[in-house]
Amino acid sequence: MAETNKAEAKKPEACMRMKSTGLGTTMLFADVDKVDVVDDMLILHINSVSPVRWHIRAGITYKGMLTLLWAVFKNFLAVKFVFLGFTKLKNPRLPDDF
């Protein structure tokens, strides 16, 4: 029983967390593998590491990137994170739910 609690308490060292309504409360931990440009889209290749190993591709158009940048830069805390987030690289605080 103690081993199960240790496994649940230890979270993988991954740079991304993803949730989907189709997965219920399951949280995917993932890393960005590479970025490609295909035609008019930027393709992110993402490898999930826990609880399953999947290769996920996400495509974003130029208009989508502009929308994303606008959403980030109109939020002061997001701007602060983008420019000062490197100070927390060694020991980031990661919320359990977002």
Image: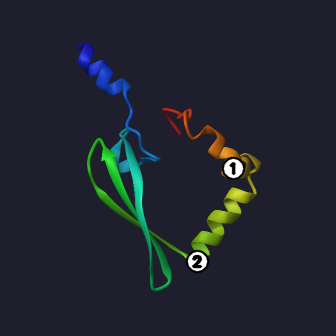
From the viewer's perspective, tell me whether residue 69 is left or right of residue 59.
right
On residue 62, which mark appears?
A: 2
Residue drawn at (39%, 49%) of the image: 30
On residue 78, which mark appears?
A: 1
From the viewer's perspective, tell me whether residue 42 is left or right of residue 64.
left
Residues 81 and 20: in front is 81
Cα distance, mark 2 to mark 1? 20 Å
Residue drawn at (65%, 71%) of the image: 66
Q: Which quarter of the figure has residue 89? A: top right
Where residue 82 sits: x, y (%)?
Answer: 67, 52
Q: Earlier in the sequence, mark 2 or mark 1?
A: 2
Q: Is residue 27 above or below residue 2?
A: below
Q: Amino acid at mark 1?
A: Ala
Q: Are marks 2 and 1 in contact (CB under 8 Å)?
A: no
Q: Is residue 5 above or below residue 25?
A: above
Where residue 28 sits: x, y (%)?
Answer: 37, 45
Q: Amino acid at mark 2?
A: Tyr
Question: Farthest bottom residue?
Answer: 39
User: Of helix, strand and loop, which one carries label 2?
Assistant: helix
Question: Farthest top residue?
Answer: 2
Where residue 75 sits: x, y (%)?
Answer: 74, 52
Q: Quadrant of the N terminus?
A: top left
